[in-house]
Amino acid sequence: MIIKIQKYNLSHIFDRLKSSHKLIGPKIENNAIILSEIEFHDIPAGYRDQQSPGCYKLKQGENAEVFSFSPGPDSFKRFLHPPFAEIFRFEKSKKGITISPSNSDEKPFAFIGIRACDISAMKLYDRVFSGEHIRDKTYESLRKNCFIMAVNCIYPGDNCFCQSIGTGPEVKDYFDIVITEIRDSFILETGTVAGERLLTGLQQDRVNDNDMKERNESIQRCGKAMKKAIKFDELPWLIYRNLEHPRWAEIEKRDLECGNCTQVCPTCFCNSSYDLVSLSGVLKKSEGLSGVRIRAWDSCFSKNFARVHGGNFRPSRKARYRQWMSHKLAYTFEQFGLPGCVGCGRCITWCPVGIDITHELEALRNAR
C-alpha cells in the first residue's frame, strides 16, 4: 500500500497511534536531538546537524523539511535494552525460594522516524536477545507489539557511511510504515497489516510517477552524498589478518577508554548483572531474604569487564579497542550472520578525541 499525504496529516497518524502505543521519536534536548516520548509538535522540523569526529552542532536550517536532521546519540536500544533493567525479583523464606519475573504493563513502543541503519541494528538485537539460542524475556516483553514508523533518509549525516555497508539510506524491510519526504508531502508505504490498518480512512492524495521518481532520486542522492565509506567486501578477513598490526598501539595512545562509542552504538549489547538484596534480609534474626536482579549496560572498554578468576584476558587499552572494533566488523558476522556496524557514524561523532573507525580500518587495509 502506497499513499501520499499532506505533511500536516501526519499528526492524525500520531493521534491514532498514541491510543495504543507509547510514541518514541526525535526531539531537542540540551542542544541535541534525542529520542523520547513525544507529541507531533516535538519533531525538530527544519533543524540540521553538523557532525565531524568528536563534534556535534545543531542549528535551524533554511529548508522546510520535517525530517531534515540525522540521528543523534540515541537509538531504540535505550528502550528495548534499557541502561538499567529489573530482570526478576527473588524472595527466600523457610518454605523455599520464589522468583518472580518482571513484566511491563505499559503500552508497547511506537518508534517514530527510525532510520535504515537503526532498523539493521534492531535485526541484530532480535537475534541476540530473541534468537535461536537465547530468549531474553525482558527484551521480548519490551519488543512485543512494537510499531515501527521508519523514515527514508534524504540527507546524510556528515559521519554516515551506511551506503557502503548496505544498511541504508533506504528502508527496505522490517517496518510497519516507512515515510519518504517530498516537497510539501509525505509518501507512505506500508510493510504490515498493522500499518495498512493505521492508514485506513486517512485523507490522502494519489501517488503518481513523478512522486515515485522524486522519492527514488532523493534516496539515491543521499547515498551518493555520503562523505565516508568502508570497503565492506574485505570484511571480516581484513580484521583477522591484522590482529597484531602496530596501528592498534597508535590508537591506544589516543583512546580515552571512556566507552562513549559503546553507549551510543545501536548494536553494542555488553551488560553486567548484579543482585540488590534488601538490608533486612541480611540481619541475623531475619527469617527471609529478598532482592532484585539488575542488568546494566557495560562496556568492553572497561578494564573490569574482562576480569575473571585468575586475571584479566584484555589487560591493555590496545586489546580492549581491538576487541570492540573486531566485534563490530568481524566476530558478529560469524555469531549472527549480520554486521555489527551499521554505518550510523555515532561512534565517530561522540568520541571525545574523534577516533574515526573508517580511517582506522583504512589504515589496517594499507598495511605493508
Image (cartoon, rainbow, N blue to C red):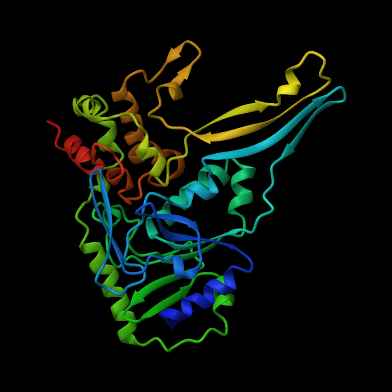
Q: As drawn, which residue projects farthest toward the top?
A: 310
Residue placed at 27% from the left, 44% from the top? 348
Which percent across, then down, holds residue 29?
41, 54
- Horizontally, residue 232 falls left or right of residue 146, namely left
Image height of 184 relative to 226, above or below: below
Q: Residue furthest front?
A: 30
In which quarter of the view is residue 199 placed? Answer: bottom right
Q: Nearer the viewer, residue 332 or 23?
A: 23
Question: Residue 310 in the image: x percent, y percent?
Answer: 47, 10
Q: Is residue 90 left or right of residue 161?
A: right
Answer above or below: position of 122 versus 223. above
Q: Which of 309 and 326 lies nearest the eye of the viewer?
A: 309
Q: Quadrant of the C terminus?
A: top left
Please name the residue shown 31% across and 80% down the image: 183
The furthest residue to the right? 95
Q: Relative to residue 131, is residue 61 depicted above or below?
A: below
Of 37 and 358, nearer the camera is 37
Counting from the top left corner in percent of width and height, residue 174 is at 48, 61
Query: How many numbered marks are there?
Result: 0
Residue drawn at 42 percent across, 47 percent down: 266
- 315 on left or right of 91: left
**Residue 160: x %, y % from top left:** 27, 54
Image-quadrant location for residue 335: top left
